[in-house]
Structures are given as C-alpha cells and as structure tokens.
Amino acid sequence: MTEMVADFRAPTTNFTKRAGLGTGPVPTEPYRSAVYFEQERDRIFKRAWLCLGRVERLPDPGDYIVEQIEPARASILVTRTRDGAIKAFYNVCSHRSNTLVLDREGSASRFMCRYHNWTYRNDGALLGIPDERNFFGIDKQACGLTTVAVDVWEGWVFVNLQRAPEVTLAEFLGEFGEAYRHIPYQNADKSILYVSHLNANWKVIADAFAETYHVPAIHPETIGATFASRDNPFARPISTQTWGPHRSVSTYGNPDYAPPERARVERLAYSNIATGNVLSAAGLDDMDLFLKHPAINPTKSEHWAVDVTWIFPNFMIDVSPGGFWTHHFWPISFNRTRWEARFHVPPAGDVWQRLQQEHYIARLGEILLEDVGNTERTQAGLESGAKDSMPLQDGEVMIRHSLHHIQKWIDADSVREAIS
Amino acid sequence: MTERSLPDGFEALEPFRAYWGVPGTQDRRDRREAASMADIVAFYEVMIALAPAPAAMKHLERFALDAMPPREARLMELVLALAHVSMATELHGQPRAPHTPYPHGVRLVQGPAYFG
C-alpha cells in the first residue's frame, strides 16, 4: 500500500491515490438530476442500513421515537419493549394505512390509531379492533405492525428497509465497524438539535462537511482562524481513512488560536473554562479518551481538531477533543434536504459553563447558516447546467469517495456486490 | 409599588429586558436576527462597554441554574442574549452573517438544559 503523506506542509498529499480513486473531474449530474435521485432512492436508501441516532434516546421500556426517512417515503417507529429489546416498524396502521403515531418521541406501551381506534402493543402486536365482529374473519395475528429490520452498533440504532436485508449491519459496516469500536460517546444522552431545511441536493451539503478546504474562505470570522494557520493556510487535512463505502478525515486545528482582543464576549464566555477547542462545549477531561483511540486521529498529530467520520450514505459522526456531534442529511427531493445537526452538550454545572454553551450554540447557528447560504448558491450553479463536471483536489477526497460509492451502489444488482 | 424585575445594581438594563429577556436559546436567536444593528449595539454597549456583564456573572455565579430566583433568572436571560448579540458585534459587524439567507430554515428545535 502507498505510504500516506500525512503532512500538510508537503508539496502535495496523496490521500486520493491511496484510497484507490481516480483523479479526473467528477460529474455534476448526480447533484441536479431527478432521475439520478430516483436511483439513489431505490438502490441506496431502500437497501443500505441507515443510522437513526443514539440508543440513549430510548432508555426505558415503553420509550419510542419516530423518524422520517423521506427518500424512502417512510415514517419509522422505533420502540423499546418490556423485555428491553429495540424494535422498529413502519408507522402505519394495518387497517387503512393511516399514520399511527403522530408525535416525535415519548413513552407508551401501546399505540392507538386515531382513525378507527385500532390498538397495538409496542412490540407491534395488534391488540384491539373496535367492532371486530363486523369484519370478515379477520386474522388479528397477521395484522400486526409491519416490522423493519433494526440493529444496534456501539449504541447507534440502524434500520434497513429491505424486507429481508441482504447483508447484516455488521457486514455493512465491515472493517469500519471493527475499527470504530469502544469509542466513548460523552454526554450521549444529552443533546441540542439544529434542524435545517435547504434548497440543495443532499450531497451538496454533506460534501460541505467532508472537506475543510472551504473553511478559510466561507467561515473567515466564525471558525476560519481555528481550522487554518500560517503553517496550513488552506486547511489541508492531516490524514484520511477509508473502509469500503465508509470514510473518515482528520482535520487540522490551529493550536495557537485564542479569541481576538475585540471578541470581548467570547473572552468572557471562555474565561473560566479550560477548553481545548472552541467548537466544543465539553471540557479537557474528555479529550484523553479520544486521544488514545487508534482509529481517531490515526497519525496522532498534535495539530488535530476534528475527525469527520462519514458512514455511508448520509450520516456523519464527528469527534473532537471536547466531544462529539452528528449530521444526518435526509434528501426530500433532488434539490431539497432536511439536515439534522445534533451536538452533545451536558447540563451546565454553573452560570459560566451555561454562558459558554450559549456562545457555542449561537456560533454554531452562524456556521450552519453560512453553509446553508453557500450550498444553495452551489445548487443554483449546478442546476444552471453551466458545468458538467467539477475538479476535486486531494483534500476533497471524501467527496470523490462518496460519489464513487453512490455510483457503485446504483450500478450493483445486489448489496453484497455493492459492498464488495 | 411595582416589584423591581432585576437584581439591585442592574437597573440600567431595565429598558432592554422587554426585548432581550426571552426564555429560550432559539428565542434569543430570533430576537438577534430580527434586530437592527443600532438596537444590537445599544444593548451590547450597555452590557459590555459599561461592564455589567462580568459584574452580572459575578452576581449570578452564587446561584444554582436549577434554582435561580426570578430576578436573577431575568438577569441570566440578558447575559445569555449577549452571547447572541456578540455574533453581530464581534464577528460580522452587521446584524447577520454576510451572504446568508434571511428568513431561513435553520432552527434550534432542542436547546440545552436550563434557559434553553
């Protein structure tokens, strides 16, 4: 295998070559084509294992969450049953297919459809049909909720919308699933959630989080000074990893960053807190847990800021010295996306920590907005048809890897072939 | 007699309470995004240039976040609003981030514990 040039000061890096990818321009059609989106819908979102979030959202028997998977036109109900098992179902009544559960999360041992009061236990069994005698020999046992394949890996809940999944979650995750075991997810049960709706293809916004090449340009005031420096003016990554369709990039952090003199509130907010990274809301104590893990910042660079870990197709886990956060990019149409960014933030211990959190969350909102504005402008340019391809540099290898595997899944007649 | 709404010594902030003293983090985002730069700067200057923000923090640090008396809670809301206002004054030099859409579809739908 080619030795990795994991040195942002080298004349060029070699992440793309090392990932076994070509270096030519990539097509723009996947970002603007309704036809291509239909292929993604059928070949990817209805066949791949899809992460729905942390299992800590369902701590006790009776807890449930409802998640929309727009590209599969499905609402999915995930429950924890009396015996502690995690179950998933289409959120659809067996009678006339009305939506069963209308809220987003809660706790209930049974669910009643509002249309005709059909009642189900949270393990999917149909319990009651009003005026059952007037049906025609209905088989209640056959009228339970439609199950969806579900599995949990390292506390992450995944579902698969194939009636009988061709591969297990462990097979889908492959070597990545092994390499990323036993990572401590601090404050996994406490999070803040930004939800954004934007007019762009889901890959345009996902791509924006897969490279830091753009950071000095798009985010000069919010985070530019933390991801680049005189040593690394173009925010080159410090290392990359790929495992089948999954991938990760370790990004550069400016070790000398300090709030500028004019940032008086930022200085106030951070004055009483030891923090290794201005993007993080957690403390330095958590950092060691990440630093020791072989899959995180694998070259153990002292310049490490964040690992962006992109699990195929649409989910990212980001780990930084102070904590972790996630991105879900759910396509609604070829040019409309629901983007969920969840940051894990502990309850503040005092007013100083709470002020720092507010500053952190306010700044996050600004960064997300900068990305939304940027992606919508990109989408407009893509849809104009001006360009049929785009050149990608070595630091943008994750985008190239993503497009390569999306096409591979579309072309593959079986999932096993897609992940081979 | 009307009860004073803020702790003693913070009367100068009273005129700002109606607009900036709102309960949740998304509410504070909304207020900052809808405000003019003149209103933002007026609030920022009273809070920071006249230095009551560090004083407010010193006052508030004696109280637990989950048991703050009403007057202290109102002061805490103003301090938290300052975090949002500082995006305009310290980062952008204008009310909202340059080249970003407004109105827009970016919402904090779940805030942090306490005052979130």
Image: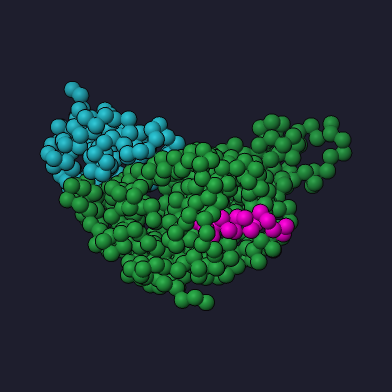
On-image quarter of the C terminus of chain A: bottom right
Return the residue nearer the eye: B94 or A25: A25
Q: Is residue A206 left or right of residue A409?
A: left
Q: Which x, y percent locates residue A87? A: 65, 53
Residue at position x 38%, y 33% in the image:
B102
Chain B appears what colour?
Answer: cyan
| Residue range (magenta) | A399-414
Give the camera-side residue of A209 and A128: A209
State how the image is colored: by chain
Q: Which chain is green?
A: A
Looking at the image, the residue that sits furthest to the right is A137
Q: Would residue A284 be seen by someone viewing this image from the given angle?
A: yes
The image shows residue A375 at horizontal and vertical percentages of: 45, 43
Q: Quadrant of residue A274?
A: bottom left
In the image, residue A78 above or below residue A114: below
Magenta stretch: includes residue A20 = no
Residue at 84% over, 39% down: A138
Q: Is residue A39 left or right of residue A384?
A: right
Q: How many marks?
A: 0
> Seen in the image, is B112 located left or right of residue A254?
right
Q: Quadrant of residue A159?
A: bottom right
Inspect this view and state whether residue A84 appears: no
Query: Looking at the magenta stretch, what is its main secondary structure?
Result: helix
Residue at 80% x, 43% y is A140
Counting from the top left corner in percent of width and height, residue A351 is at: 26, 48
Q: Position of residue A234 (x, y in %)?
A: 34, 58
As drawn, which residue projects farthest toward the top? B1
Task: Name the residue: 41% across, 40% down.
Answer: A373
Please indicate whether residue A159 sits to the left or right of residue A279 in the image: right
